[in-house]
Image (cartoon, rainbow, N blue to C red):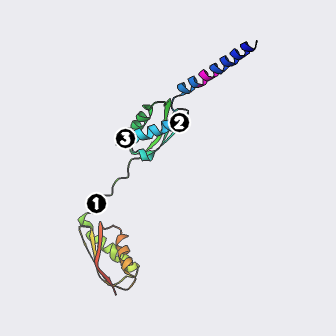
């Protein structure tokens, strides 16, 4: 009888061991490993902004969140995630937000308006002694200002609307 009891205990132990190791083999990679693999594959693809995409994995289900600049990029990120071993499904919650358009360059015909805006800002900030010249959108400040007004003069030019493309103040000095 004792021998039978030992056999039963051994059989149960072996079954438990096989069940546990068999289940571990079938479960696939852990969630953290899946997340790392998805991020790595995205980073290797120059068309996908991996740093802007958040990847979360729970029980093999990958969720993508963040902002991308096109529908093609959104689809590419999902395709990459689906290709990773252990991924059961992908929830693609990426938001397509096209990049902001770049402002048009300042036209040379705007020079007079830029100069007037800078002069108005200088007057508003009570900065005197500055001569303003604008050519091709580049504002050049020359002259002598009271101590402490050098920064105010430069800010007056940089904050003008319409905005100069560049402000040169190397000819500007303080008393």
Distance between the Cα atoms at labels 2 and 1? 49 Å
Residue drawn at point x = 25 percent, y = 63 percent? 107
Badge 2 is on which residue?
Answer: 31
Residue drawn at point x = 70 percent, y = 19 percent? 9
Residue 12, quarter of the rendered image: top right
Distance between the Cα atoms at labels 3 and 1? 35 Å
Badge 1 is on which residue?
Answer: 105
Lower sequence index among marks 2 and 1: 2
Q: Main secondary structure of the magenta part?
A: helix
Please state the horizontal and vertical placement of residue 99, each as a whole percent of the image. 38, 50
User: Contact (CB < 8 A) between labels 2 and 3?
Assistant: no
Q: Residue at the far right: name it.
A: 1
Neighbour class for label 2 at 10 Å: few (<14), some, many (≥20)?
A: some
Please state the horizontal and vertical placement of residue 37, each as a whole percent of the image. 45, 37
Query: Image quadrant for the N terminus?
Result: top right
Residue 24, quarter of the rendered image: top right
Residue 44: image tag: 3
Magenta span contains residue 123: no
Please state the horizontal and vertical placement of residue 7, each as a whole percent of the image. 69, 15
Q: Is residue 131 left or right of residue 127?
A: left
């Amino acid at each position: 009888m004792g021998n039978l009891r030992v056999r039963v205990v051994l059989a149960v132990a072996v079954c438990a061991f096989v069940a546990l190791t068999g289940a571990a083999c079938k479960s696939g990679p852990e969630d953290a490993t899946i997340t790392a693999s998805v991020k790595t594959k995205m980073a290797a693809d120059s068309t996908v902004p991996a740093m802007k995409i958040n990847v979360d994995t729970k029980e093999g289900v990958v969720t993508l969140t963040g902002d991308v600049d096109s529908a093609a990029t959104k689809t590419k990120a999902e395709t990459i995630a689906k290709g990773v071993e252990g991924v059961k499904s992908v929830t693609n919650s990426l938001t397509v937000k096209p990049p902001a358009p770049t402002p048009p360059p300042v036209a040379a015909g705007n020079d007079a308006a830029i100069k007037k805006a800078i002069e108005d800002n200088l007057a508003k900030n009570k900065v005197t002694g500055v001569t303003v010249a604008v050519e091709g959108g580049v504002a050049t400040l020359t002259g002598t200002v009271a101590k402490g007004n050098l920064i105010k003069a430069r800010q007056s030019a940089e904050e003008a609307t319409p905005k100069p493309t560049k402000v040169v103040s190397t000819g500007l000095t303080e008393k």
